[in-house]
Amino acid sequence: MLDVEYIQEAVRKAAFFDMEYKLFGSWGHAHIFKPVLNESELAAWEEIMQINLPEDYKTYLTKLGNGGAGPAYGISPFHLPLYEHLKVTSIYSDENAKLFNKVAQEWFELSNTDEEELYEQYKQDSPQEQKLSFNEWEEQFFDKYYDELEQKLMNNGQLFIANQGCSIDIYMILNGTERGMCHCTNIDYDYAYPCTNEQAKQYNLLSEPRPYRSVLWSEYKESLTDFKQYLMAYVTSVLDKIEDFSIEQRQQFQYEREKVLEFEQAMQEQDFVGIERLVEKLDPLSFSFKTRSYYIESLERLTAKFPSNILLQKFLSNVKYKPNTTRAYNSVVFEHKSLNNIDYPHPTFEEFKATFMYQM
């Protein structure tokens, strides 16, 4: 069972103290839980779908948040999906080992075969009068075959719960011997064994080199992890990150929080003269990722009201500028700016601002 109080306290601490979000993907959720899911609504969904979700996952949704803080980009919100494929028997189960091996082998071969070569073989094997064009063949045979395999590997009996980045999705198995276990996969993974070094780290299949072939169920099974392990790996990692901050960093973060609260008070009181005075004293290049995120959003809203204010416009430009960064974003991604509000648990700006005011 999840220790709800421990996780809440750890994540609350992370939301307050972590100002840099160096844990991959944490800038997407900022260590914030979304509002919890109503237990009666979840119970009604389980009855309608005849699916009993794993207890730890239900605890997360109803006691911690319906999406939010978690590994990488966070746990995806649960939208009470009514997809029939959720009830279909999963191939990720001991009784379906032979079927898994067969499907993985077919996927592996398909992923490592050139479509044009397959089409050429098709033309050689087909009578002249029955031959299809490449586009027709691709649509009627190749894509159909590909979709059938993808359905078995990445949909049937599985629930999408998170994204790890680079299109790597996390699925929870809903039935069979591995019910409640999680695994990560995507259409670019060819179900090979052994994987490349990077894939091997992702799928926990690091081992002695073996012939490059499709993975067997007995091997793939070792890569599965339960939801509690998946979540707690994030909790442990983020607490370790906080402990690594130096005294100087902690002092800088505290100074930044104080200035943010001063700025926010001036915003609430519409003290625009006070805002300009604060802006003149701040050094944007010294800001942490979290503080920069706050000022970017606040100033974008402010300059929309006062587009001719040169001081605020210049300060906003300086805040947005961050040299020598490899991140795709220069601030936290807020819900109203997200291109995908369905799968990604981005916080609202109000939820984010509240973390500056936590009493720790």
Image: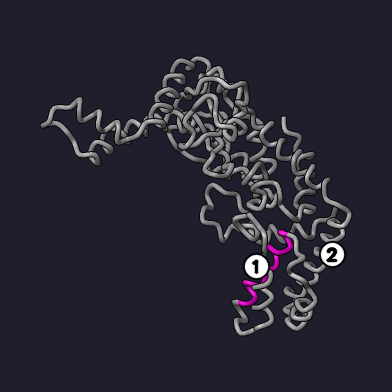
Which residue in the protein does label 2 denote?
A: 255
Quadrant that contains the N terminus: top right
Which residue in the protein does label 1 denote?
A: 320
Residue 299: in magenta span: yes
Q: Which residue occupies 25% across, 41% down? A: 135
Q: Secondary structure at mark 2?
A: helix
Determine whether, in the image, residue 137 is placed left or right of residue 188: left
- Decide which of 1, 261 is in the foreground and name it: 261
As shown in the figure, which amino acid type bears the numbered disc 2? Answer: Tyr
Give how far across and how far down residue 163 sits, in percent: 57, 42
Q: Which residue occupies 59% across, 77% down? A: 304
- Decide which of 155, 8 is in the foreground and name it: 155
- Report the predominant secondary structure element of the magenta stretch: helix
Give the mark nearest the N terminus, 1 or 2: 2
Give how far across and how far down residue 173 sits, in percent: 54, 28
- What range of the chain is rendered magenta? 289-303
Q: Which residue occupies 77% across, 79% down? A: 280
Query: In terms of image quadrants, where is residue 254?
Result: bottom right
- Decide which of 126, 37 is in the foreground and name it: 126
Specify few, some or many for label 2: CA neighbours under 10 Å numbering under 14, 14-19, or 20 or more. Answer: few
Query: In terms of image quadrants, where is residue 270?
Result: bottom right
